[in-house]
Image: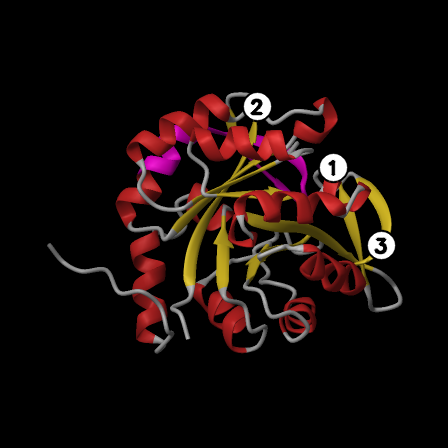
Amino acid sequence: MRPIRLIARLDIKGPNLIKGIHLEGLRVIGDPQAYAQRYYEQGIDEIIYMDSVASLYGRNNLSELLEHTARHVFVPITVGGGVRSVEDARRLLRTGADKVAINTAAISRPELLSEIAEEFGSQAVVLSVEAKRLNSGRWEAYTDNGREHSGRDVVEWVEEAEKMGAGELLLTSIDQEGTRRGFDIELLSAISNLVSIPVIASGGMGSTADLVSAVENGHADAVAMADILHYDRMTVESIRGEALAANMNIRELSVS
């Protein structure tokens, strides 16, 4: 089994790194380049850039930021928001992304997942799912950075998307996002036990104990963090150290 990955998630609006609660009430944090560099120096395993308004404007605007990051940060980078075609994916991958994350356009036209996977390989295709719990106990997939209903059941959608070529899943709980109350373990477990592709837990990490629960109880393959890092509540080093102390299967950084 591969080590659990620690991933820094950076949501971007215009030139700014932002953070909200339930994907709403977005607050400006600072310069995303500086934060990406900081997390890289602290030993983060991967970085995710999400353009939070790309679907509104029909285009991902992170090329300049991505190009700068790729020159200075040497870990895998996933970029999402506004990816609507093979050409959109090609532009981001050529600029420096290792993977592209797709949500809104994939729900509108699931064939897009197959088209990008056929062109670049399924390892480059990340399905981004923004899930909101329903009164029925199931979850609905939302689009446009959590703004719009899709009417699609998350479990059914994820199962279809894997067959269409998605190679990884970024699973964000809208209910937990930004709350520091931990991940939606029931959601994580339901999806992780259904699919064979890696699942990244996103939304709600308040402590290392939440990471441990996401892996041990939710069976996540990776954990995406934002609030806990952006507000300096913990560093990547301290999270990694506590996870190792809890006997997690996590990459141990070599000391130079």
- The earlier-in-sequence mark between 2 and 1 is 2
CA–CA distance between discs 2 and 1?
A: 15 Å
Rendered residue at 37%/31% (across/down)? 69
In the picture, the quarter occupied by the N terminus is bottom left
**Amino acid type, mark 2:** Asn
**Amino acid type, mark 3:** Arg
The number of numbered badges drawn on the structure is 3
Q: Is residue 201 above or below residue 31?
A: below
Q: Position of residue 150 (x, y in %)?
A: 84, 46
Which residue reaches farthest left? Answer: 256
Question: Circle 2: is it few (<14), some (14-19), or many (20+) Cα within 10 Å?
Answer: some
Residue behind mark 2: 61
In the picture, the quarter occupied by the C terminus is bottom left
- The earlier-in-sequence mark between 1 and 3 is 1
- Tell me the tag on residue 144: 1
Q: Is residue 126 left or right of residue 159?
A: left
Q: Is residue 153 visible?
A: yes
CA–CA distance between discs 1 and 3?
A: 14 Å
Q: Is residue 149 left or right of residue 96?
A: right
Rendered residue at 67%/60% (across/down)? 162
Question: Which callout, 2 or 1, points to the residue nearer the camera?
Answer: 2
Which residue is more in the foreground, 154 or 178? 154
Residue behind mark 3: 152
Q: Is residue 27 magenta?
A: yes
Q: Is residue 108 above or below residue 253?
A: above
- Are the two marked residues, 1 and 3, in contact with CB atoms closer than 8 angstroms? no
- Are the two marked residues, 3 and 2, in contact with CB atoms closer than 8 angstroms? no
Q: Is residue 53 above or below residue 177?
A: above
